[in-house]
Amino acid sequence: MATSIPSVRLAAGDDASGMANMLGELLADNLRDYPARARVAKVVRGPVVMTAADRDRSVTVRFSGKEIVVDEGVIDGAPCITGQWLDLAKLCSGQLSPFKAVVERRLGVEHLRRADLLAATGFVMSVPASYYGDAPRVARWQIIVSVLAVLLVAVVVAALVRRSR
């Protein structure tokens, strides 16, 4: 039985910016072509802001389960990924791993209290290395990033447990 995938909608419709269009197309393609990304997109909830600092352009991607809405502007307090337009374009085309870009400081991240949402967004937006023929080179990097992601989740959970006591 096939499962439904979340729809992707541009809130501004035909008036959406180029950045919003790129994100919308990437998300729609990834949800259609990669079932694991569609499953993650169905369970994640909340907004993530992406800002092209050198172009003074921000787009908010809101996950709500059945739909992903790509909207112009910023939602205050939402997790935010910031970088140069070209790095965001590479991210949106799947040519730049979100995890690698953050580690290399090509992209900045704000409001880490929703690290889960940022990680899910990075996964849903990423294109497998095999798409570009880089699988062998990227395999080691993916192992390192996976281990770091698990460690990050463990630290966040430990902090939340400690805070609740």
Image (cartoon, grey):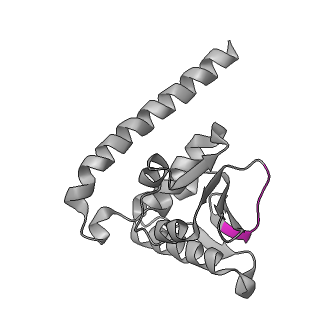
Where 115 falls versus 156 (above or below)?
below
* Residue 39 visible in the current orientation: no
Q: Residue furthest front?
A: 54
Vertical position of residue 143 compared to residue 53: above or below: above
Closer to the camera in the image, 117 or 52: 52
Q: Left or right of 98: which side holds 73? A: right
Considering depth in this image, is 125 or 68 the residue closer to the camera? 125
Q: Position of residue 24 (x, y in %)?
A: 59, 74
Q: Quadrant of the N terminus?
A: bottom left
Residue name at image x 29 percent, y 71 percent: 132
In percent of width and height, residue 135 lies at 24, 61
Instruction: Specify the farthest residue to the bottom.
Output: 14
What residue is drawn where x is 40% and y is 68%? 95
The answer to whether any part of residue 12 appears in the image is: yes
Q: Which residues are magenta?
A: 69-76
- Residue 145 position by quadrant: top left
Name the spot of residue 121 as percent of width and height, x first: 54, 55
- Quadrant of residue 83 within the rendered picture: bottom right
Q: Is residue 91 magenta?
A: no
Q: Quadrant of the C terminus?
A: top right
Residue drawn 74% across and 75% down? 11
